[in-house]
Image (spheres, rainbow, N blue to C red):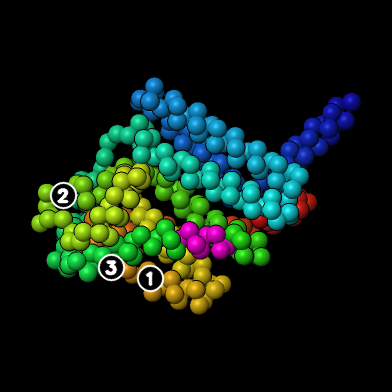
Amino acid sequence: MGKKQGDTTGSHIQKVGRGLLRIGLLEWVVGLHLLVFIFRLSHAADTQGAKPYLWKMWAVLLLLSISTFAYRRFFEGRIRFRLLHQATVVSCVFIPFFMLQKMIPIINPVEVDAKLSAIDHALVGMDASVWLEQFATTFTSAWFAVSYFGYYIVGGSFILGMMFFCRRQDRLMEFGLMLLAAACIADITYTFVPARGPYHYLASVFKGKLPGETVVPFVHQFIKNGPLRDVFPSMHTCLPLSMFLFSSRYFPKAGFAIGLWIPHIILSTMFLRYHYLIDVLAGIILALTLFALARPAIRGYQSLRRKYGVDASP
């Protein structure tokens, strides 16, 4: 009798284990990032202010769970449902991002610009944004503003192109893991290292505003709609570099084109006074780390699935 119960229990455990392995690695990453937000909001000093966002995070986690269960259980392999599920997973990263402007002060109201600026001084003896001011003209300001805003156009186009036209699921998941894991890590980090950047913190140090009456003010106004305290790490450095590294591996021509843009967008983050040098370095390190880990992680996870007889796409 005891042996039969033990066999039944073991069978149930294996069944649950195989069910959990059907969940994709990227889905685990996004779900974990939502759980961290829930934990941070649950322990926020402003409990009343955190409450509505806490419920929203639970709702987003529920959305991710329902989409993952439905796709993995009933619709896996069907292109339309795959696109719908992938869009849902991406949305579960972007929804918290668009709430960061309100959530960060609730979770952690202490801004650390002084510490980031001090690190820059320890590294290079100055603030990069202040040093770059000497090169500010109407042309250079517009040039770097366009380069900076290109992040949204080039990045969005690249992501949509991969979702709709990439036929290799392993490559698509490698790309998705690199970008979305970076976004998840960055969003969580912003709650631990909230800062407004040189534009705000060093405002009294700059000689004046950047020249330009159209492009630069437009970008400044556009940025005000974002989280505002999202400088460390610099995602304007991390994501373009990630796209460059991924493209260079699989699509060399696209990688070459993105590579021409990389120096401009990285410099623009400091020229436009949005990031400290340490933010940029952190973005570079994050991109290189995820580039090195993404492909082995996916292959290792797929190997684990095969070991336990789980046939599922990455």
Spot occupied by residue 306 in the image (x, y as percentages of width and height): 74, 55
In this rendering, position of residue 177 left or right of residue 114: right
In depth, the one of 36 and 270 nearer the eye is 270
Q: Residue at x 63, y 38 (%)?
A: 65
Which comes sooner in the sequence, label 1 or label 3? 3
Amino acid of disc 2: Ala
Amino acid of disc 3: Trp
Residue 207 position by quadrant: bottom left
Residues under labels 3 and 2: Cα distance? 22 Å
Spot occupied by residue 176 in the image (x, y as percentages of width and height): 55, 56
Residue count near mark 1 (Cα–Cα under 10 Å), binned few <14, some 14–19, many ≥20:
some
In the rendered image, the vertical position of residue 159 relative to residue 84, given as above or below = below
Q: Quadrant of the C terminus?
A: bottom right
Which comes sooner in the sequence, label 2 or label 1? 2
- Residue that numbered label 3 is attached to: 143
Q: Residue at x 73, y 54 (%)?
A: 78
- Residue that numbered label 2 is attached to: 203
Spot the residue most to the front: 214
Amino acid of disc 1: Trp
In depth, the one of 27 and 148 nearer the eye is 148
Range shown magenta: 155-162
Mark 1 and mark 2 in contact (Cβ < 8 Å)? no
In this rendering, position of residue 137 left or right of residue 67: left
Residue count near mark 3 (Cα–Cα under 10 Å), binned few <14, some 14–19, many ≥20:
some
Does dot 1 land on a helix, a strand or a loop? helix
Residues under labels 1 and 3: Cα distance? 11 Å
The label shown at residue 261 is 1
Which comes sooner in the sequence, label 3 or label 2? 3
Front: mark 1 or 3:
3
Task: Please tell me whether residue 12 belongs to the stretch shown in magenta.
Answer: no
Spot occupied by residue 31 in the image (x, y as percentages of width and height): 56, 41
